[in-house]
Amino acid sequence: MTDAIDATDTPTPRRKPKPEKTTIGGRELKPSTLMMGHGYDPALSEGSLKAPIFLTSTFAFENAAAGKRHFEGITGKREGGAEGLVYSRFNGPNQEILEDRLAIWDGAEDALAFSSGMTAICILMLAYVSQGDVMVHSGPLYAASEGFVAKVLSKFGVTYVDFPAGASREEIEAVLEKAKDQAAKQGGKVAMIYLESPANPTNALVDIEAVNAARGAVLDATCPIAIDNTFLGPLWQRPLMHGADIVVYSLTKYVGGHSDLVAGGISGAKKWMDPVRALRNTMGGIVDPNTAWMLMRSLETVELRMERAGKNAEKVCVFLRDHPKVEGLGYLGFISDPSQQDIFDRHCTGAGSTFSLYIKGGEAESFRFLDNLTIAKLAVSLGGTETLASLPAAMTHLSVPDERKAALGITDNLVRVSIGIEDPDDLIADFDQALAQV
Ligand SMILES: *Cc1c(COP(=O)(O)O)cnc(C)c1O
């Protein structure tokens, strides 16, 4: 027993390796090195080389004063969040190690993991909007994100203004001015600028630097810029380096990478994460320990997998580009628009492995192509080890009104492909024989 009754005097038990070494002789260690052990000390878990999965709903306090101190952190009575583990709706060892490692990839101070990408997106937005506010977003967004803004936030008096991915700084500034006026009329503020780049399924890129400059000219820096980086992150685009404040992921895709889990994450400076953490503490939505553990395993190979998938996609696209049954390709490796190429050169270090393939013909020809693929599976989603193909107009975007489909270029012959890590020549052989059936 300890005499301490003043919560601030209680010693903090060791539960994380301290201090964390992220440099050797002044050399900053790379994320791919840190993924094997960062945030975990085997000595705290019987020497187990890999972190155990901590299946528990609650954590025993070392004494009553420590319990009080931990709750002060959880409830925000004391700055800096919880120092100790309290209850599994708030945090847990697997989740904390995962979050430490996710933050490394984006060069972020802090990260939060969620039970799905959409949970991350909804809790993020809810944490920042109040009645009368305006959301500004790029378009198109992932359909559920767009629906959450237009159909759910609107129930609470939040309106939105959008601009097309690819807009110039001047166009973005004009949209922010409009949003500011709209917010003033509604008695609110511009709550968030929410981006998604590249957009799905058009692959149009958003100029993050231009958005940041436009915010500087029109709004103040209390309005965060968040960006859904699912398609290129964490390897090929690091938005925090280009003026974004918060990076959002569906970890279900490249980060999970094996099509065997659903999860989401956000990362950024602690001051941007704190309101979201507080709302997650209230609502739940934290990733479960088993999924967090699977994601830790996935993060060890994320660079290997993404590099291989990216190289495969390039080879496949070189083959498809000149194929007589192919009308065109929406692949970031072959951009034709100079301003899009300029954004790509400033923001991206790779073209990714998800692209749009336009088959000569319409739905019937596209169906024939899809039905004849043998290696590639017919499924929505992306970023897994296996190659997937789908037809957005007939599947993910079926409910999008025809005019909007036309405006977004979502045609009946647009096949969405996510290339995996199979042998690239096998994939080419599969695409070749399926195209021959068209
Ligand atoms: C899949 C996806 C989401 C939603 O993520 P879930 O993990 O399915 O909830 C959000 N944004 C983008 C760009 C996605 O591809």
Image: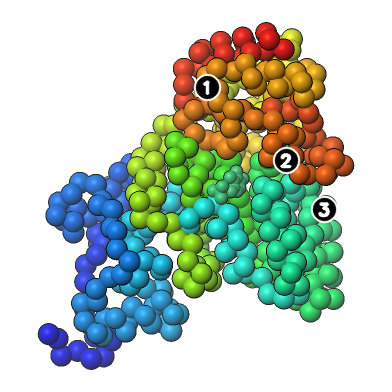
Q: In percent of the image, x 70 and y 64: which residue is there?
A: 152
> Where's residue 265, x and y in %?
50, 54
* Label 3: how many Cα within 10 Å (few below 14, some 14–19, many 20+): few
Specify the quadrant of the image occupied by residue 1. Answer: bottom left
User: Dot 2 lies on which element?
Assistant: loop
Which residue is label 2 attached to? 397
Q: Amino acid at mark 2?
A: His
**Residue 325 appears left or right of 252:** right
- Find out whether the residues at labels 2 and 3 contact each other: C-beta distance under 8 Å: no
Question: In the rendered view, would you say 349 is above or below 250?
Answer: above
User: Dot 1 lies on which element?
Assistant: helix
Which residue is label 1 attached to? 312
Q: In percent of the image, x 41 and y 73: which residue is there?
A: 81
Which residue is label 3 attached to? 170
Q: Amino acid at mark 1?
A: Asn
User: In the image, which disc is placed on residue 325?
Assistant: none
Q: CA distance from mark 2 to mark 3?
A: 30 Å
Specify the quadrant of the image occupied by residue 352. Answer: top right
Q: Amino acid at mark 3?
A: Glu
> Where's residue 179, x and y in %?
80, 65
